[in-house]
Image: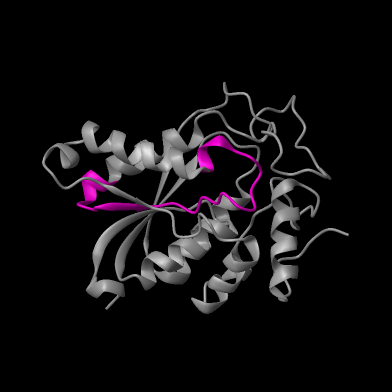
Amino acid sequence: MGVHGVVNLPAVVLLSGGLDSTVTLAKAIADGHSVTALSFEYGQKHTRELDSAKNVCKHYGVRHVIMKMDLTSFRSSLIRDDMEIPKGRDHIGNDIPDTYVPARNIIMLSAAAGLCESTDSDRIYIGANSVDYSGYPDCRPEFFESFEEMIGVGTKAGVEGHGIKIETPILRLSKADIVRLGMELKAPLELTWSCYSGGKKACGKCDSCILRLNGFKEAGVKDPVGYEK
């Protein structure tokens, strides 16, 4: 039995395979939900994170849906070969970096809402964070509040009076607190991949690596993932 007496109510969890989304998946399971994890192959330069998502789902034995969509016409250094992923930035979060994929969370949450209606799920869990993050506009509390209102009037579930909720359990946590929560929930942090670059080891220099490494350091825990020198 989960919190508030919730037992096996279905939920959709957006799972990239990174630290934040994996801890969010662990939280959804701890809350007592039967989970469908949703990942996307959208034209990103590498699928290393997707491999981690698959391994995380195998670890928990949950259903894993991977949707394919072509976002290669979108401007983002995570997608386009003519754009370099920024590394070694000193002021993360002060601006919107070119790793931002235009409207990505809008697109993914819309797909998740459709999957919710198709699986009789009443909520979407997303591992967005507005504290230690890269400055993305679609990771802010007001975005999720507005989106929940929108799907409340734009879905059959919402019109019939049982709208889909958006759960953001780590939205206001520091990266260190996310690490601590993951350990408390016994999430398989060693299976996660946060680096924007592909390869056998994380680069340690992109925004995502820097934020992750700082989080583990502040939590007083060694990151189980290997990094390049």
On screen, 183 above or below 11?
A: below
Residue 145 visible within the image: yes
In the image, 94 versus 74, the foreground residue is: 94
Q: Nearer the viewer, residue 176 or 142?
A: 142
Q: Is residue 26 left or right of residue 151?
A: right
The relative height of residue 43 versus residue 39 in the rendered view (above or below) is: above
Q: Which residue is outermost to the right?
A: 229
Q: Is residue 124 magenta?
A: yes
Snapshot quadrant of residue 76 = top right
For the point 59% across and 73% down, the residue is 180
Colour convention? one colour
Q: Is residue 88 left or right of residue 216?
A: right
Q: Is 218 covered by the magenta stretch?
A: no
Q: Residue furthest top?
A: 73
Residue closest to the far left: 160
How many dots with numbers? 0
In the image, 52 versus 144, the foreground residue is 144
**Where is residue 96 drawn, in percent x and y?**
66, 33
131 sits left or right of 62 in the view: right
Residue 7 sits above or below residue 105 on the image: below
Q: Position of residue 37 (x, y in %)?
A: 39, 55
Q: Residue at x 77, y 32 (%)?
A: 84
- Image quadrant holding the N terminus, namely bottom left
- Highlighted range, magenta: 116-139
Q: Nearer the viewer, residue 163 or 82?
A: 163
Q: Position of residue 227 (x, y in %)?
A: 79, 61
> Can see residue 68?
no
- Residue 207, given in percent of the width and then of the height, sits at 73, 47
Quadrant location of the C terminus?
Answer: bottom right
